[in-house]
Image (cartoon, grey):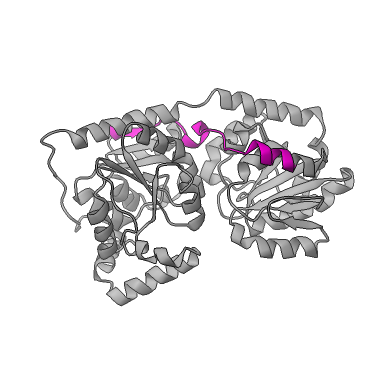
Amino acid sequence: MSAAPWPLRLWFGGSRALPRMAEIALARRVHRGQNSAPARLSERLGRATLDRPQGPLVWINAASVGEVASIADLARDLMAEGFTVLVTTTTTTGGARARRIEGALHQYQPLDTARATRAFLDHWRPDLACFVEGDLWPRLLAETGARDVPLALLNARPSKSRARAPRLNAALLSRFDLVTAQSEAVRAEILSLGLDPARVLAPGDLKSAASPLPADPARLALLEADLAGAPLWAAVSTHAEDEREVIAAHLAARAAQPGLRLILAPRHPDRAPMVEHALREAGFGVARGERPGDAEVWLVDRMGETGAIFRLAPLVFLGGSFGPQGGHNPWEAATLGAALLHGPRVSNAAGAYATLDETGAAREVADGAALGHAIAALIGTPEIDAMRAAARKIMADRGQARPATLEALRALMTARLAPGHTSSKAAP
């Protein structure tokens, strides 16, 4: 590793030399921080809790909910072609989403240490390893590549770190046999690091090509009955920085929209007690759980409800856009015809938001005051109907990213499984 940038050399040295007791302590801390099931702590140390099925296996490493959502359909495509698919996540919310992909296996991502990654790879023996968007762990990449497993980075998004640390990013990205980028602009960003253009494709954003989120029709009917045609908006995938503005916005908007109701779905449902306290402090009636009843605010405290929410609420504010998170996937809401509002901090999906803004399907708001004004001005007007129609139209024109990505992965798998294939990569 002498030619590698010094941060990588330092990481490889530390991840090899970490004492076992320190590794166990770190695994416990990481696992506890994600509120994971204690019985699955061993997965952080690379010890599998599932058997490896016979036959070719595709491993997809997807950090959390957004990344898992972007590859769910692709995972189903791969399984339909006869591959076993293993999805690893770092978060429990991502794990819950991964376990909803029927037929896929789920494990938690091992620590990026020599022992953990080697134990993981010894057990699972993947025939193809896919990393989603930008969650790149040096040891995991190096150990996988050393076994001559083809590496693919899927749905690469814009990243300021590529300009800030070009040598480090070039060293990590050069390990990949295939990189698919969300846009031509991202492809150009990656090529500027010196990667082979033949290995970097721009098929489009997988998130924009995903199937609509599901919702149970019977449950949807019950929720519609509870909400009873009241003026309604939703704030989805929110964080603390968003919720302060959402509360201010709702207080302002309900003065202009009598009977206005809000569905609030935090990005991390385990934060619901804190959010409920803030809502009650602001004077709102709050319902938590499966049904909103007649409460002014329905606080959603479990996963799997966004498909219903995007069908119920004509106007949706997407969180992660007032704080440092960089914005969350807007395509899921747009696919279901929701008009979108978002804050100014959406660097993680800048191209997607720009497209939706330019076509009139979405609008940027600067703060809670602007959000409240937009809600009051839009609900119940022809303007919101035009935004929703624009969202449906743009989504009808998308969808090539998935088949193009699948075709590129097929080519990698064909080479991997070809008779006489031998390893050519060195260990880290």
- Residue 167 lies left or right of residue 275; in this view the side is left
Q: Reply yes or no: does residue 183 show up in magenta.
A: no
* Closest to the observer, 329 or 263: 263
Q: Reply yes or no: does residue 202 show up in magenta.
A: yes
Q: Position of residue 249 (x, y in %)?
A: 78, 50
Q: Residue at x 47, y 57 (%)?
A: 91
Q: Is residue 25 above or below residue 267?
A: below
Q: Quadrant of the C terminus?
A: bottom left
Indicate the quadrant where residue 224 lies: top right
For the question of whether residue 364 can be seen, the reply is no
* Closest to the observer, 408 or 45: 45
- Residue 235 lies left or right of residue 426; in this view the side is right
- Residue 16 lies left or right of residue 344; in this view the side is left
Q: How many marks?
A: 0
Q: Which residues are magenta?
A: 197-223
Q: Quadrant of the N terminus?
A: bottom left
- Residue 104 lies left or right of residue 393; in this view the side is left
Residue at the bottom extreme of this rendering:
21
Residue at the left extreme of this rendering:
420
Q: Position of residue 55 (x, y in %)?
A: 24, 41
Q: Residue at x 30, y 53 (%)?
A: 51
For the question of whether residue 332 can be seen, the reply is yes
* Closest to the observer, 242 or 316: 316
Q: Residue at x 76, y 60 (%)?
A: 279
Q: Position of residue 328 (x, y in %)?
A: 56, 46
Q: Position of residue 157 (x, y in %)?
A: 45, 42
